[in-house]
Image (cartoon, rainbow, N blue to C red):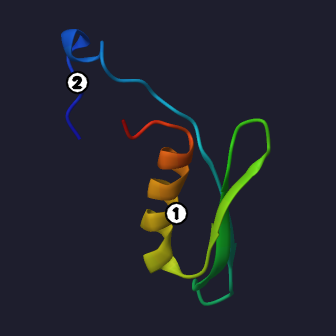
């Protein structure tokens, strides 16, 4: 991953998302949820393929996709 030079950061910002996962003994994702740093729960999802759409949903719900 390449670092963004300082002059490229003016229109970007870092966000923190807590990822809570329930994984079985075989490493399969049973379900998960995203949460804010204040602990409020965000989208819930089942299975690894649903993780990326859940992140997109979280980003959109926080107005970060504009």
> Which residue is more in the foreground, 37 or 54?
54
Q: Residue at x 49, y 75 (%)?
A: 50
Q: Nearer the viewer, mark 1 or mark 2?
A: 1
- Which residue ends up furthest to the right in the rendered image? 39
The spot of residue 65 in percent (x, y) is: 39, 41
Q: Residues within 10 Å of mark 1 (few under 14, many from 20)?
A: some
Element under disc 2: loop
Image disc number at residue 22:
none
**CA distance separating discs 1 and 2:** 25 Å
Q: Residue at x 79, y 44 (%)?
A: 39
Judge whether 52 appears above or below 14 on screen.
below
Is residue 9 toward the left or the right of residue 26 in the image? Answer: left
When asked about the image quadrant of residue 31, the answer is bottom right
Element under disc 1: helix
Judge whether 52 appears above or below 23 on screen.
above
Image disc number at residue 54:
1
Quadrant placement of the C terminus:
top left
Q: Residues within 10 Å of mark 2 (few under 14, many from 20)?
A: few
Q: Residue at x 34, y 23 (%)?
A: 12
Q: How many marks?
A: 2
Quadrant placement of the N terminus:
top left
The spot of residue 14 in percent (x, y) is: 46, 28
Q: Name the N-terminal-most of marks 1 and 2.
A: 2
Is residue 38 toward the left or the right of residue 42 in the image? Answer: right
- Which residue ends up furthest to the bottom in the rendered image? 26
Residue corresponding to mark 2: 4
Judge whether 10 appears above or below 42 on screen.
above
When asked about the image quadrant of residue 62, the answer is top right
């Amino acid at each position: 991953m390449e670092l963004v030079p300082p002059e490229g950061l003016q229109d970007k910002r870092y966000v923190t998302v807590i990822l809570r996962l329930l994984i079985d003994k075989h490493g399969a994702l049973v379900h998960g949820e995203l949460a804010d740093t204040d602990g409020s729960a965000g989208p819930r999802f089942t299975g690894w393929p649903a993780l990326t759409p859940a992140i997109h949903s979280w980003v959109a719900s926080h107005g970060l996709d504009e």
